[in-house]
Amino acid sequence: MIPFASQRANGQDLATHLQNAQDNERVDLAHVRGAIARDLHGAFAEWEVQAHALTRCQKYLYSLSVNPDPRQGPLTRAQYFDYIGRAEDRLGLAGQPRAVVFHVKDGREHCHVVWSRIDAEKGRAVQLSFDKEKLMAVTREFAREHGLTLPKGYDRDRDREAETERGPRQASLYEQHQQNLSGLTQDQRRTAVTDAWRGADSPQAFVAALSQHGYILATGKRPYVLVDLDGNMNALPKLIADKQVRTKDIRAFLGTAYPPESLPSVEEARTLAAEKTAALCNAKDDRGREAIREPEDRKDRFAEMQRRQAVRRKEAEESRERLRVRQETEKQRQERRHAGERKSLKAAYLIRTRDIRAQRAANAPRGLAAFLGRVTGVEAIRERVHRYQDWKRYQAYEVRAEDVAERQRREKLDLTRRHEMQALDMARTIRNLDKLDARERRSLQAGLERQRREAARQVMPYVPALTLELKPPGRPARVVKAMTRHRHGPARAVTDLDEKHALKERLDLNRDFDAAAQGLTLPPRRLRQQAPGIAHYERPRGGRGQYAPAGPVPPGGRVVMTRPVDPRQGHPDARPQPAFDIAEDFERAAEGLPPRRRRGEDRGQPDIARAFKAAAEGQSRETGGEDARAPTAEQNRDRERAARPRNPDRPHRPRNDDPSRDR
């Protein structure tokens, strides 16, 4: 047997869960202690009021589920309550309010016990320290006395190897919800993701394997998370069942090809999963039928649930009607009793008055005594005494009548309050019945959806691949872009375009050498000239996954020509670049002459002839050999100007790239 306990709040949700008849074949509320209400919702509501009024305890309930092994035979109710008594004695919950519920699910009976942690007399919550260890000790003691076999981890007498071997981990509430929705356990998810991890030799292969199993690689609070077809999110490191794989290893493996900033968010991945799910529901198999069909008994199961709920609601309505009739009967009975009491009191007073008057009349003097009494005034005194006695008797009657009326008002108020409480309790029962019906409908829908997905996995070996077009696509680092980031945007665009054209045209050295040997002049391959205008690129704007404004030119970018410029004046960023003649350079190099400078030639233009000659002689311009070009007069002038101390009174003027303007 396995006990599972936790401290928790939200007693109304727990009461609805414990009374769910859709997930359980039988629900039996066996015992409620320490509450006026006889149902779970009412009892948990009372305990919540005590927690908020007397303490600051948030988790005021302690829930325990006892699951015996069905292979070792069922437990009797006496054995269940024996275990419950031992557990509450060891935990310090003896005498606390509690509720005991028995469930039968899939032919297996188990028990749920819920205690209130609030000690109303002391005004504090019961401290539960080391409750798991205490429950394990109680379980070992109970199993030893009743001859039960416990799973691994409970018996301390086993060897160290068996003791350290762990069984399946208890699923959390979130994992249990995922399992109820998809039908896949957390172990099955770990197995699929772990196999994909071990079988992938690259980040692209790993992401493709994940997509074949219906997972999207996304980013959220953690850099790498997985979103499945149902929209459930799990952290990627938790789904890789390999103790040697750390989170840093996963980040290092995926960081180069799939950095977190390039991945979709969890919301975007869930949107794509919803679209794929809709497409999957509309898919057809080889026979033209729907690949995923609703269970055949869907309508029957819904009808059965509605029939059961109708019976339960009818019983509740009948109970409310019986309560109304009983309350009306009690009210009428009380009114009749009160009226009888008042009538009896008044009748007793009248009878007493009539008897006294009759007695006075019988004892009244007659004849000479009556005459003497009137003459002497004795009769007048007697009458005044009688009137005083009647007044006192009437005063006593009024006091008694007032006391009776006050008592009857209290009784009527008590009855009214009791009827109001009963009506509120019945209304709460009806509301809780609505909650219970809604929970059972959700449970049935989740069960049908789980069956539908399990049937789909049997038809198709894999769910449709979830591939997301990442924006921007993975690009290697561009060092040139980082070096020239300070340059003007149009100039950088022109340079990138020239580099693109230069990459397309490969040098044909065989043709160049043949032409140089024959003394021919080759036509220029491509004049590096810019159209009369400054070019800039329009890049797409957006949030996550879009190109940044200062990023490289995308393949789909548009070139827009603006700011017309006179070609005769030129532009420092769009100056036409002359072609070079390899044959002439080789001839001058053979004669020992320097290559001829051409008008408008860029100083950074490579001297191919001199480079070939230096390479043949084993020298290099960069190493400062004999053929290294000496600095020109203009370069010397620039160096002297840079070394000259600057006048602090003279404002700084940036030097233009055009050397003609310095003159």
Image (cartoon, rainbow, N blue to C red):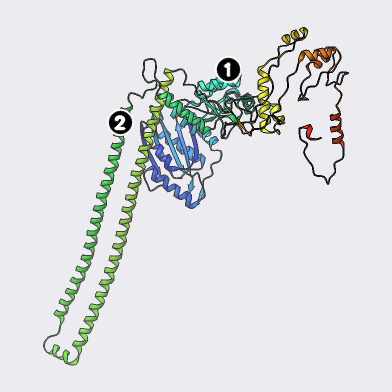
Tell me what residue is drawn at x 66 percent, y 20 percent.
501
The location of residue 385, given as percent across then percent down, is: 23, 83
Mark 1 residue type: Gly
Tell me what residue is drawn at x 33 percent, y 27 percent.
298
Instruction: Give the farthest residue toward the left.
Output: 367
Between 465 and 181, the one lying in front of the other is 465
The location of residue 408, given as percent across then percent down, is: 28, 62
Query: Which quarter of the figure has residue 479?
Result: top right
The location of residue 308, given as percent across then percent down, is: 30, 34
Instruction: Give the farthest residue toward the right.
Output: 626
**How many C-alpha atoms fall within 10 Å of the one at disc 1: few (<14), some, or many (≥20)?**
few
Query: Which quarter of the figure has residue 398?
Result: bottom left
Horizontal placement of 598 versus 239: left or right?
Answer: right
Disc 2 element: helix
Q: On screen, 261 above or below 379?
A: above
Tell me what residue is drawn at x 67 percent, y 31 percent.
566
Between 215 and 108, the one lying in front of the other is 215
* Residue 531 numbered mark, or none: none
Question: In this view of the protein, can residue 148 be seen by the observer?
Answer: yes
> Which of marks 1 and 2 precedes in the sequence?
1
Instruction: Give the farthest residue toward the front.
Output: 568
Disc 1 element: loop
Instruction: Tell me whether circle 2 and circle 1 mark residues in contact (CB < 8 Å).
Output: no
Distance Cα–Cα, label 2 vs label 1: 47 Å
Between 368 and 140, the one lying in front of the other is 140
Question: In this view of the protein, can residue 68 be seen by the observer?
Answer: no
The location of residue 630, given as percent across then percent down, is: 87, 24
* Residue 199 numbered mark, or none: 1
Q: On screen, 466 above or below 519?
A: below
* Residue 304 numbered mark, or none: 2
Mark 2 residue type: Glu
